[in-house]
Image (spheres, rainbow, N blue to C red):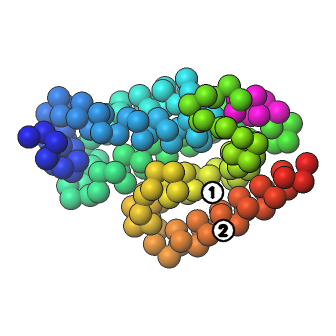
Amino acid sequence: MEETLTDEWLMEAVKRGELNRASLLFDRYHKHLYNFFVKITMDKDLGHDLTQNVFMRMIQYRHTYQNGAIFKSWIFKIARNIYADHYKKNKMMVSDDNLEIMDQKLVATDDLLIEDEQHKLLYIALYKLKPEQKEMLLLSKFQKMKYEEIASIYDTTVGAIKTKVHRAMGQLKENYLELEKI
């Protein structure tokens, strides 16, 4: 019975004060959010922490959920905001100086299953993208979100998202080819 309840119905129940319904949303989304955070931060422990923060913020700001809104877009908007807050607080800017540290993280992150040098280069190339570009690719390619859902997260048009994803893919390719030369 509980599997047939939509995410939107569950979130509306949480909004009304039925906080026990949040556990079903957690069960459905914690792995997706964790994978998003691990890929964007390359840190499993931080991925766990940020995932927990999403669900704490979901409860805290449940009153902001608009009935009828797509829950998946809303929860990933929260995730994006949590990552942005963490990014600003810790100033995790990527530079050539810290690529060696990131390379060590890639080797240590066995959940990513980086089996060969090409995959490793791809993740390094992804990591070198600007934060928004990295997010766009993680949401569209790894989380398999539709452009409409991503547009809802970013409060923009589908056309703008398509353009940004296309540019991010171009930059990813450029980064990868640069790394391949090294």
x and y percentages locating residue 67 in the rendered image: 20, 55
Residue denoted by label 1: 133
Label 2 or label 1, whichever comes before in sequence order: 1
Where disc 1 sits, the SS reads helix
* Mark linked to residue 167: 2
Q: Is residue 27 left or right of residue 93?
A: left
Q: Looking at the image, which residue sits at the far bottom?
A: 159
Q: Is residue 136 magenta?
A: no
Q: Give 5 or 49, whichever is nearer the viewer.
A: 5
Residue located at (46% from left, 51% from top): 143
- Callouts 2 and 1 close, C-beta under 8 Å: yes
Instruction: Residue at 8%, 40% (x, y): give it.
Output: 1
- Mark 2–mark 1 Cα distance, whole angstroms, equals 8 Å
Residues packed near mark 1 inside 10 Å, few (<14), some (14 to 19) or many (20 plus): many
**22 shown above or below 145:** above
Q: Amino acid at mark 1?
A: Gln
What residue do we see at 65% from left, 62% from top? 168
Residue 169 visible? The answer is: yes
x, y percentage for residue 110? Answer: 61, 28
Secondary structure mostly seen in the magenta stretch:
helix
Give the residue type that dot 2 points to. Answer: Arg
- Of 139 and 76, nearer the camera is 139
Furthest-left residue in view?
1
Tell me what residue is drawn at x 42 percent, y 48 percent: 76
